[in-house]
Image (cartoon, rainbow, N blue to C red):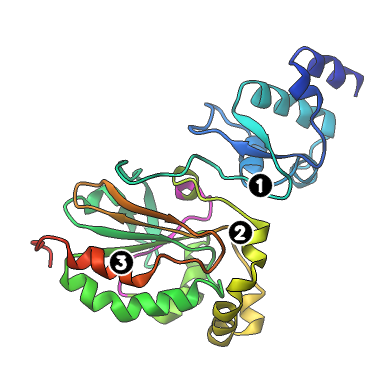
Amino acid sequence: MRATEVHAATRGEQARDLQPSDCFLAAAPAPSGQTQAYRLASQGLSLGEIARRLPMRRDRLTRQGVPLVSGGALRAADSIGIPAVAPRLTAGQIAPDFRLTDISGEPLRLSDLRGQPVWLLFGRHSTCTLCTPRHAQIIALSEHLQARGVQIVSVWGSGVAELQQGVGVLRPPYPVLADPDDTAYEQYGLSMSLRGALDGRNLPTLIQGLRMVGVARSLRSDGELLRMPAEFLIGPDGEIQQAHYNGYGADWLPLKRVLAWADALPCSPHG
């Protein structure tokens, strides 16, 4: 520990103050050669939790954390509010490209959809009781949206096999993409929030989701329970036209806004 203290002393007061309970906000883009510690910190784990997860002695972990903090790749966050991974995206920005595998095992690259308007949704995990009712609504609207040329794409923090047994049971008529490593989540700046997950306004959707998923299956989480979903309405040129980050778990983009956006689109050759 003495060696760690000496090392921290050379990095400034912020680094010397690192504590096991500290959580962090992660910078974007991620530093080159990012460590496991960086990835776990960017997912909202505290310094002490990271040490247990790796596992790694705390003095070694501090040596990794000090340059990340002093260099600006990580900065301390309020321990109550779990951090965002990257800055949130806004209307007018080009939607970051990604390549993920869909529920049938086929790869899909977002940029391959250029020329079509896209409704891009980020859920939580395959048996999410807040996401499942939402996708039942989307499935009911999908025919109307497809007639307008809109391509719906959903991203989940679960593997393909889990998605096949989870949201795949609903048979969504649009790509359901697996992102178990949170690659796209990081690109799009999705945050985690304990407060958002426990918000009382989630209760009606949660009850509906429990009826759809079942209590036993809902307890088998294969993703991030504290992740806050997000939705993006993307134009044919790949530009984000509307960006919505859920303030709490069930704070979805109002469907009337999605329908108004879709109905205002020019006629598409894909429609």
Amino acid type indicated by mark 3? Val
Please give the residue where the numbered disc 1 appears in the rendered image: 44
Q: Which residues are magenta?
A: 173-184
Amino acid type indicated by mark 1? Gly
> Could you say which quadrant of the image residue 155 lies in?
bottom left
Task: Answer with mark 1 or mark 2, whichever residue precedes in sequence.
Answer: 1
Give x and y (percent) for residue 144. 22, 76
Q: Is residue 194 above or below residue 254?
A: above
Q: Look at the image and tell me whether residue 225 can be seen.
A: no
Q: Is residue 10 left or right of residue 38?
A: right
Neighbours of disc 1 within 10 Å: few (<14), some (14-19), many (20+): many
Judge by depth and name the residue closer to the eye, 237 or 111.
237
Please give the residue where the numbered disc 3 appears in the rendered image: 258
Q: Which numbered tag is attached to residue 63?
A: none
Q: Secondary structure at mark 3?
A: helix
Q: Are marks 1 and 2 in contact (CB under 8 Å)?
A: yes
Q: What is the quadrant of the C terminus in the image?
A: bottom left
Q: Look at the image and tell me whether residue 17 can be seen.
A: yes
Neighbours of disc 3 within 10 Å: few (<14), some (14-19), many (20+): some
Q: Is residue 92 left or right of residue 19?
A: left
Q: Nearer the viewer, mark 3 or mark 1?
A: 3
